[in-house]
Image (cartoon, rainbow, N blue to C red):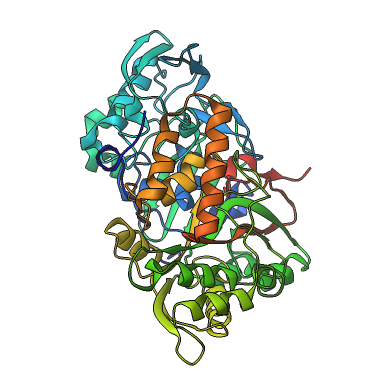
């Protein structure tokens, strides 16, 4: 399948995120029993439907959804794939048919068995243009004519998409109970959500907290903690206070200096893991960014090593493409050197200098990620030294999604790109292909290189093609990758906590130490 602008726009969608407020109650009675795990979380949950709507492709919400809902396929902490509700899956030899097998003994949280018909219902719903699934047509609609025979599911490939099964462990790849959803409807489901995961929803106060209780019939076994509370604490300082005071057992996404301080305190421990998120600066093909010299100068003027080592205290991995080392198309030979003298000469060729700088706005969040605003301050300072004057505009991450969807971002905009399945379709592809609603760059040269890769069946050729695309993007400075994120997590030292490269904080893999 060769993807063009029209077909991509018909099948792709947008993303968004809602903010949250600190917890308004103290569940001390439950905590005293020792069977409750409390997590001070950095994102507030806007919806209980993880498969549709603008928020469903936000990586930050997945830890909560994964606690309540099953995915078709799951991932180990190192991102390797493992069975979820599906125990078998794949294509036939010429990749024109798909087959899947549903796990025996898996049930919904009302005890009803999960069947092949349930899987067909979920996949058809996700592919329906009216469902609101942001990637419905491109991913889920690539397979049709789905049929169930007991626990066996088969279907026809409408248009081959190499990462179809990977998406079953990724954003929107969750299953909902058809019988319950059809009974209560979309609005009713928000009030009475049901999944098949390790925990069921007991209480939910929007913008404040969600309280979960273990589902005894879960096929994956009994979690160590009977009760889980996710507090929505979107302010980093408040999250530090939560875990330091003992009000919460785990928190994440805190400033690195606070992480270093807290992990050294008695009773607390910490882990900082390189995760599948990339800090990057989108360039929008408008105004000064249409000048290749300006883009290239902006790229060559940024000292990523200094940003990581000094500002992030070493908690980051400098990158030159939108592929992290764990991704399938990572190529360490593609680099963009830090060379401020070259940046000055490029700007001079377009008539700019420190006395006559090029001017534009750069947008960024502040406090959404560790040191996000400070990183952009450092980038702007580096740019100023070579002849670029950038004015910083602060916005909420939800505003970023809104502006990106309407292609009205500033000439430069900071963002955190997550790709926990590590496929180049979902890092460079969605971020840089002009017809994608997630892209801010739109030029024929790049689209012509990317378009054919969506349907390439030869895997070696596909990955080589993406590496060539990344090299071309780096040469032309169509985007400015900065570093791979490192996620700091602080937790009580009497917990056995397992970090996840997908940036998840999962209560059902956490347990007390023996």
Is 373 situated left or right of 312 in this image? Answer: left
312 or 414: nearer the eye?
Answer: 414
- Above/below status of 191 relative to 269: above
- Above/below status of 85 relative to 406: above
Is 437 situated left or right of 342 in this image? Answer: left
- Above/below status of 245 relative to 78: below
Quadrant in which the C terminus is drawn? top right
Q: Residue at x 41, y 26 (%)?
A: 108
Q: Residue at x 39, y 20 (%)?
A: 112
Residue 33 horizontal/vertical position (percent): 61, 49
Quadrant in which the N terminus is drawn? top left
Q: Residue at x 52, y 79 (%)?
A: 380
Residue 415 horizontal/vertical position (percent): 47, 62
**Within the image, what quadrant is residue 140 found in?**
top left
Residue 244 horizontal/vertical position (percent): 65, 69
Outermost residue, bottom side: 355
Residue 25 visible here: no
- Above/below status of 116 relative to 510: above
**Within the image, what quadrant is residue 351 found in?**
bottom left
12 or 273: nearer the eye?
Answer: 12
Outermost residue, front side: 349
């Amino acid at each position: 399948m060769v993807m063009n602008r029209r077909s991509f726009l018909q099948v792709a969608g947008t993303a968004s995120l809602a903010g949250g407020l600190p917890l308004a109650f103290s569940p001390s009675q439950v905590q005293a029993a020792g069977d409750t795990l409390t997590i001070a979380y950095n994102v507030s949950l806007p919806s209980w439907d993880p498969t549709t709507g603008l928020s469903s492709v936000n990586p930050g919400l997945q830890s909560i959804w994964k606690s309540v809902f099953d995915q078709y396929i799951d991932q180990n902490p190192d991102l390797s794939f493992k069975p979820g509700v599906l125990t078998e899956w794949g294509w036939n030899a010429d990749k024109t048919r798909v087959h899947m097998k549903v796990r025996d003994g898996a049930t919904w949280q009302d005890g009803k068995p999960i069947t092949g018909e349930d899987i067909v219902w979920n996949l058809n719903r996700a592919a329906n243009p009216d469902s609101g699934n942001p990637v419905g047509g491109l991913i889920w609609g690539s397979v049709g004519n789905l049929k169930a025979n007991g626990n066996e599911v088969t279907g026809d490939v409408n248009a081959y998409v190499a990462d179809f099964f990977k998406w079953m462990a990724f954003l929107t790849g969750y299953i909902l109970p058809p019988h319950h959803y059809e009974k209560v409807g979309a609005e009713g489901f928000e009030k009475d959500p049901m999944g098949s995961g390790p925990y069921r929803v007991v209480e939910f106060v929007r913008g404040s907290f969600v309280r979960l209780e273990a589902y005894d019939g879960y096929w994956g076994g009994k979690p160590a903690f009977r009760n889980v509370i996710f507090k929505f604490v979107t302010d980093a300082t408040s999250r530090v206070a939560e875990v330091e005071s003992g009000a919460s057992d785990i928190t994440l996404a805190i400033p690195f200096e606070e992480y270093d301080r807290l992990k050294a305190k008695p009773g607390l421990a910490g882990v900082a893991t390189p995760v599948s998120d990339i800090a990057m600066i989108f360039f929008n093909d408008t105004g000064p960014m249409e000048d290749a010299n300006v883009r290239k100068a902006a790229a060559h003027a940024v000292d990523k090593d200094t940003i990581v080592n000094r500002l992030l205290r070493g908690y980051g991995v400098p990158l030159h493409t939108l592929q992290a080392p764990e991704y399938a198309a990572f190529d360490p030979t593609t680099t963009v050197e830090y060379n401020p003298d070259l940046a000055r000469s490029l700007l001079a060729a377009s008539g700019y200098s420190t006395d006559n700088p090029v001017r534009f706005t750069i947008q960024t969040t502040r406090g959404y990620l560790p040191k996000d605003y400070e990183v952009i301050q450092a980038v702007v300072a580096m740019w100023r030294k070579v002849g670029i004057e950038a004015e910083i505009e602060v916005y909420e991450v939800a505003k970023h999604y809104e502006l990106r969807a309407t292609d009205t971002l500033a000439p430069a905009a900071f963002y955190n790109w997550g790709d926990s399945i590590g496929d180049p379709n979902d890092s460079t592809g969605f971020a840089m292909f002009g017809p994608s609603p997630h892209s801010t760059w739109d030029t024929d040269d790049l689209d012509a290189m990317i378009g054919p890769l969506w349907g390439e069946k030869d895997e070696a050729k596909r990955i080589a093609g993406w590496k060539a695309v990344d090299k071309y993007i780096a040469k032309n400075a169509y985007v400015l990758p900065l570093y791979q994120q490192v996620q700091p997590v602080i937790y009580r030292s009497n917990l056995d906590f397992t970090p996840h490269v997908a940036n998840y904080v999962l209560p059902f893999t956490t347990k007390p130490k023996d």
